[in-house]
Image (cartoon, grey):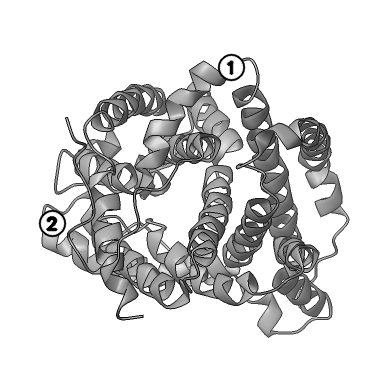
């Protein structure tokens, strides 16, 4: 291991379809964060119907879906990294553990600035992928991934809640979470950072567990691993029919789940001793609905990318190559725009303004990414991550002119 750390492989060949999908996921995340005012929206949700429409459209399309797409891409990337090293006779397991540790450090630092960041969560959940890489059966891995996506822990709690178990009928802890006053009216950056760690950090993990997001991340990462194994992105010409079938099935599932949620929820009994079954059922149903919409977005995007809109959608590939840099950069720029230690615009910016500014800002990020890769091999944080992974600064950064 020590010897191989000194050897840095050449800049890898890119799978542009995967890069474009990752860039699209980044766009979706950013479009959620903007009308969410980087989490400050929940301190004073809008009631004006016109403004609420902007919020609802964005969250219906991307809320919980862009995050899921990112988790799936994470699983594909995990396979590619491990498989490329295995083909060279190198066991990348130890180095991947260190790579995740570096990502965790970046995530923890980023979380001091923006409490809703997800890098830390992906780093921790990535640890669970390592044992699955050695499993020979892709079918078994996919089956475990599907089980995770079905939210088994929430089904267990639902059954216990229906039987009146006290532990299962306690309200979700994250329901009591509030936006710290320091974010809204305080002027101290230090106090904002302190509240992000003391309040925001545990609340994030509580939400991730209680809402089923952790199970979803693992499931999607495992499905991504399987997609990597079968060449879904490396040999896209083999999967044209599968993409169209996937699009049709996921779209039908999304429509059915979306329109039946209220009806099914009304059939779940509640009582004084069984207060949570309806909330748990809504959580399960919402998770499955989000998953079906996410798959619709994925299959739809890829069908168009490998079809009539390839040149247009390939614009997402460049930001997809530097998602780490852009994701962190988005919060570095816009947290001070909304938070009280900066401009404090959370109280005055409308949802329509936030969405339109978000669209313009992401267009600027796309242009920046395309210009950047004319001169550099990696995004700035991507280079830091890769250099830290190999414990050397000899990773090529600037392209030869």
Rendered-image quadrant of the C terminus: top left
The spot of residue 89 in percent (x, y) is 50, 70
Give 158 or 61, whichever is nearer the viewer. 61
Residue 218 found in image quarter: bottom right
Whether residue 294 is visible here, answered yes or no, is yes
Give 326 or 50, whichever is nearer the viewer. 326
Instruction: Give the side of residue 388 with respect to residue 278, left or right.
Output: left
Residue 317 found in image quarter: top left
Mark closest to the chain's N terminus, 1 or 2: 2
Q: Residues within 10 Å of mark 1 (few under 14, many from 20)?
A: few
User: How far separated are the C-alphas under marks 1 and 2?
Assistant: 44 Å
Q: In percent of the image, x 55 and y 61: which residue is there?
A: 83
The spot of residue 126 in percent (x, y) is 50, 68
Q: Residue 189 carries which label?
A: 2
Instruction: Give the side of residue 160 with respect to residue 178, left or right.
Output: right
Whether residue 198 is visible here, answered yes or no, is no
Q: In percent of the image, x 60 and y 42: which residue is there?
A: 234
Q: Which mark is residue 309?
A: 1
Give 250 or 376, whichever is nearer the viewer. 376
Q: In percent of the image, x 34 and y 73: which residue is there?
A: 4
Q: Residue 360 carries which label?
A: none
Instruction: Give the side of residue 235 with respect to residue 386, left or right.
Output: right
Q: In percent of the image, x 39 and y 73: which residue is there?
A: 95
Instruction: Give the side of residue 356 with respect to residue 148, left or right.
Output: left
Rendered-image quadrant of the N terminus: bottom left
What is the number of callouts on the image? Answer: 2
């Amino acid at each position: 291991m020590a010897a191989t750390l000194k050897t840095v492989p050449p800049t890898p060949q890119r799978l542009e379809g995967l890069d474009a999908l990752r860039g699209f996921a980044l766009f979706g995340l950013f479009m959620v964060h903007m009308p969410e005012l980087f989490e400050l929206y929940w301190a004073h949700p809008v009631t004006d119907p016109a403004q609420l429409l902007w919020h609802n459209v964005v969250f219906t399309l991307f809320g919980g879906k862009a995050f899921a797409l990112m988790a799936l891409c994470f699983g594909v990337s995990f396979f590619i990294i491990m498989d490329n090293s295995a083909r060279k006779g190198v066991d990348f397991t130890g180095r991947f553990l260190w790579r995740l540790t570096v990502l965790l450090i970046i995530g923890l630092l980023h979380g001091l600035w923006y409490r809703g960041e997800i890098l830390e969560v992906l780093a921790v959940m990535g640890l669970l992928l390592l044992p699955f890489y050695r499993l020979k059966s892709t079918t078994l891995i996919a089956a475990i991934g599907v089980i995770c996506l079905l939210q088994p822990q929430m089904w267990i709690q639902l059954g216990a809640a229906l039987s009146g178990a006290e532990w299962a009928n306690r309200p979700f802890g994250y329901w009591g979470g509030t936006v710290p006053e320091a974010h809204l009216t305080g002027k101290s950056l230090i106090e904002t950072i302190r509240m992000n760690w003391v309040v925001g950090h545990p609340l994030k993990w509580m939400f991730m567990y209680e809402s089923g997001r952790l199970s979803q991340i693992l499931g999607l990462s495992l499905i991504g691993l399987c997609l990597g194994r079968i060449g879904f992105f490396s040999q896209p010409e083999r999967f044209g029919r599968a993409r169209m079938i996937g699009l049709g099935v996921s779209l039908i599932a999304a429509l059915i789940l979306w329109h039946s949620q209220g009806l099914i929820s009304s059939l779940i009994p509640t009582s004084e001793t069984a207060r949570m079954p309806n909330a748990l059922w809504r959580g399960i149903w919402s998770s499955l609905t989000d998953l079906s919409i996410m798959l619709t977005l994925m299959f739809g995007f890829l069908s168009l990318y490998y079809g009539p809109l390839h040149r247009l959608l390939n614009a997402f590939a460049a930001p997809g190559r530097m998602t780490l840099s852009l994701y962190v950069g988005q919060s570095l720029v816009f947290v001070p725009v909304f938070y009280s230690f900066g401009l404090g615009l959370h109280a005055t910016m409308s949802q329509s303004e936030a969405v339109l500014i978000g669209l313009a800002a992401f267009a600027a990020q796309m242009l920046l990414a395309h210009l950047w890769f004319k001169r550099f091999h990696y995004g700035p944080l991507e280079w830091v991550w890769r250099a830290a992974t190999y414990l050397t600064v000899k990773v090529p950064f600037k392209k030869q002119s």
